Image (cartoon, grey):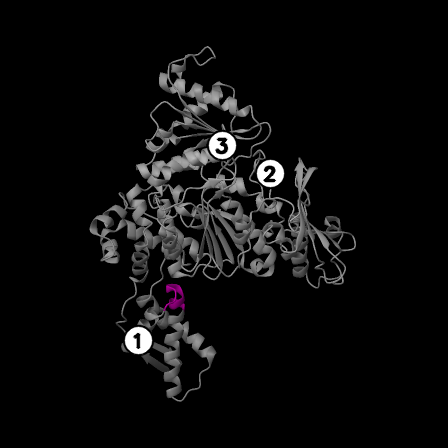
Amino acid sequence: MREDVQSLDIRDVTGTWVTAVILQKQIEARIAALADLSHTPLFFGRLDYLHAISQELSEGSGGESFYIGRRHVHDADGDPMVIDWRAPVSQPFYRASRTEPLDVERRRRFGYTGGELTAYEDEHLSDPAETETSSALLAAEIEKPRVGPMRDIVATIQPEQDEIVRADITGTVCVQGAPGTGKTAVGLHRVAYLLYAHRERLARTGTLVIGPNNAFLSYIEQVLPALGEVEVAQATVQQLVAHVEVRGEDTAEAARLKGDARMAEVLRRAVRSGITTPTEPCVVVRGSRRWRVPVYELDEIVEELKGRDIRYGAARDALPQRIAHAVLVKMEQGGEAPDDRVQDAVARNAAVKAAVKACWPLVDPAKLVLRLLSDPEFLAQCADGVLTPEEQQAVLWPKPGRSVRTARWTQADAVLVDEATDLVQRTASLGHVVLDEAQDLSPMQYRAVGRRCTTGSATVLGDLAQGTTPWATASWPEALHHLGKPAAHIEELTKGFRVPEEVIAYASRLLPSIAPGLAPASSVRESPGSLTIERVEGDESDGNGADAGDLTDAADGVMAKAVVAACLRALENEGSTGLIAADARIPLFAEALTRAGLAYLSPGAETSAEARLTLVPASLAKGLEYDYVVLDEPAAVVAGEPDERTGLRRLYVALTRAVSGLQVLHAEPLPEQLA
């Protein structure tokens, strides 16, 4: 199929060079989408229907079989060999059951090792004599070692996940998913499905995947290309709002207040604060005649534009045309017959421009926010009745910024600039946005994302129990209100596939303290021995002839030695290993691993057979997964956050990153919820 595309000669069908460039880009995109992936098989399943469903076959011709794969594959004659998993005929592969076989006689799953077909497994769904059994191939695929970036789950999508994946594009879906329930994979596969079902529409309007950080985006970036989709953009919220250079950092209270939805009203007032009542008439000179628009007429025009629900910049663009129209009415009353060209000329007249500048001045969003955060009087004027005086003081910069370029902007400030930018000029909307780890966004960040899909839909993914910011989402209805999608459908995934039951049950002890309203997750994977908890005591040599006390102090040295030993044990198994520790303790373990001769990666770097250990700060662990996890000092993870609830949520994230085994090491007492 790729060679057929490469051999296309478009010289006879391109009328202009523009057409040639467009066609060539489309051909290049098609070739990229057809790239072979050495360890990714073309098909993973087969459906044997009881009755024929193809139009070419007669009604009495019996059953029909289809191979199901990641993309459509046809032979040299154009006849299908493999059906795309997103096609309607493939849906029963995920939805059919013994109680509802959907005319499927047999569902066959294929097992692969390194791209080589090594096993298959049949389910005779229409045979009442066959008993229900769990799929060994399904379990093997889920438990396959995690080396390299995140994989697609197209061969293992479950019925409840498939319902979300194939939900209609016109509606927004919010997925509350416990750790290991596959919510991220579901969101990515939903993008792939929507691109298949609505390709032309989304090709025009665009799709975007938003993640919490670059490490997370690097981890998931290969999923969609493996499914043949190479045109989906990725970004973090901070990259979306990068109007100014972020060089500063807010206090937790300042960041919380700047992220509060009330700031939208403060900014709306600030943007419109420069609008003034006209004090002078507008006199337009054309030839030997003078046309006068009195103050009261100008005031009526300004007030009418102020009352309309349009952006500040659009209203300012309309104002000279409205004044020009008033002049044209007077011209007609004076016996002249002006046309549209005259109106445009009047709108460009110096007197009209001066009137517009006086009563509806230009607004630079960054300069406006700079003034708002630097000038107490201006902030008090705009925040009167919205923020208390104490809150206004917390929002103000400790040291006023001198210019947009030199100011020490924070991440929360950049979101305010984005809000102001949208108040001046409407932000372009995309066709579909996937927002992952959404529970960590502030109301103002939700508004920033919502602006990118005002005319499109969204898939919102998150877990309220994993909210680790001071402004973390309290409930999904509240979050969806700020996103501008209050009618979104909320789905809850509680059946875990990644985290072993023993591990998720241990982590769920924290739920009453961090998210009392959430039901604890369960896991389909029973894996005895997947959780070990070790208390580290004593003072020992580090085994390399150096005293453990060389590492900061004796206690840290002993702990570092124990953690390194745990990593070595984990690396004896196949797959990836993540060492997760409180951010402040990362330098300690970086030194310890280096002294032990253990190479390690940073979060987001691709693991390989040669480099399988990643050193992960607890703040960056969210969304990542490793076959084996070594977790250092839970108490330090909790203490590294500004409050206990946030610390326990950070710990909950760290505890649920393991696929096959979790080792918890501690010298300090465990949090009482885990004791």
The answer to whether the residues at label 3 and label 1 have Cβ atoms under 8 Å apart is: no
Q: Is residue 89 above or below residue 586?
A: below
Does dot 3 land on a helix, a strand or a loop? loop
Residue type for callout 2: Glu
Residue sitting farthest toward the bottom: 335
Disc 2/disc 3 C-alpha distance (Å):
26 Å
**Gap between marks 3 and 1 measured at Cα:** 61 Å
Q: Looking at the picture, how far across and down is residue 631, in whole percent?
A: 43, 29
Could you say where residue 377 lies in the image, as x and y percent from the top left? 22, 54
Whole-angstrom CA distance, mark 2 to mark 1, is 69 Å
Residue located farthest toward the right when viewing the structure as drawn = 77
Residue 619, visible in the rendered structure: no
Label located before the other in sequence (2 or 1): 2
Task: Give the residue number, with chain letter if any, for mark 1.
Answer: 300
The count of marks equals 3
Name the kind of residue labelled 3 in the image.
Ser
Query: What is the three-letter code of the residue carrying label 1?
Result: Glu
- Indicate whether 409 appears above or below 531: below
N-terminal label among 2 and 3: 2
**Which numbered marker is on residue 141?**
2
Mark 1: which secondary structure?
Answer: helix
* Residue 226, picture quadrant: top right
Q: Determine the main secondary structure of the stretch shown in magenta.
A: helix
Q: Nearer the viewer, residue 209 or 633?
A: 633
Numbered disc in front, either 2 or 3: 2
Residue 430 versus residue 434: which sits nearer the camera? Answer: 434
> Which region of the structure is painted magenta?
309-317
Compared with 193, 637 (above or below) is above
Q: Residues within 10 Å of mark 2 (few under 14, many from 20)?
A: some
Which residue is denoted by mark 3 in the rendering? 602
Q: Is the C terminus in the top left, top right, bottom left or bottom right quadrant?
A: top left
Residue 201 at what x, y percent from top left?
Answer: 57, 61
